[in-house]
Amino acid sequence: MEEKYELLKNDTINYRESTLYRVRALRGFNGIRKGSKGGFIRSKKNLSQEGNCWIKNDAKVYENALISGDAIVSDNAEVFNSAKIFGNAHVFGLSQVFGNAKVYNEAEVSELVKVYGDARVFDSAKVYGNALVFGNAMVCQNAKIYKNAIVYNFAIISGEGEVFGNARVCEDAQVFGLGKVSGNAQIYGDAIIFSNMSVIGNIQLYK
């Protein structure tokens, strides 16, 4: 297999007790020109030589994290621990994906978001703002999590569901269809928000 990038031994940073190396393309692919410099990785185990995956700008991928498929990590985003970004996913801004978290398919994680634990963001889901997604939570299909929302435990946000503001969705709760949770609302237990339901303000809802 022809390698698509190399590590620049003379372009490094010391970061979190590790030396990270900037990558440089050895051939053109997916709009990346031969000789283009990318972001930083700890070793070639962090960025697949296959597919069109790439790390741009000053993004950092280290420890046992892996970027593969056609995924892109850019800006100042970080992916570390054993996190995996694949498919056509895009992680950018100042976002962080770590632990055993996975972001894949066409999903986007951006701005100041943190996705960690065993959380998964996939399909065409978008997580942005200052949102947190962690534990075993899943955000999928066309769902959106944004502003200061937090989704955790085993919560599932799917369909066209949205969680935003300072809302919390946790435990085994689900938001799907066109359901929306916002303000300071808290949804937990086995509660389900679906169809055109909206939970707004300081409401606590559980089952």
Image (cartoon, rainbow, N blue to C red):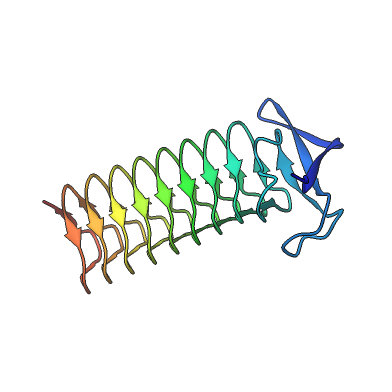
171 relative position to 60: left or right: left
Mark count: 0
Residue at 47% across, 46% down: 102
Where residue 171 sits, quadrant-wise, is: top left
Image x and y of residue 23, in percent: 78, 44
Residue 13 against residue 112 in the figure, above or below:
above
Residue farthest toward the front in the current orientation of the protein: 1
Where residue 119 sits, quadrant-wise, is: top left
5 relative position to 117: left or right: right
- Whether residue 133 is visible here, answered yes or no, is no
Residue farthest toward the bottom in the current orientation of the protein: 196
120 relative position to 48: left or right: left
Image x and y of residue 195, in percent: 21, 72
What is the quadrant of the N terminus in the image? top right
Along the line of sight, the residue nearer the viewer: 196 or 106: 106
Residue 3 against residue 157 in the figure, above or below:
above
Residue at 81% across, 42% down: 6
Image x and y of residue 7, in percent: 80, 39
Residue at 41% across, 55% down: 148
Along the line of sight, the residue nearer the viewer: 191 or 7: 7
Residue at 32% across, 66% down: 159
Image x and y of residue 115, in percent: 46, 46
- Whether residue 65 is visible here, answered yes or no, is yes
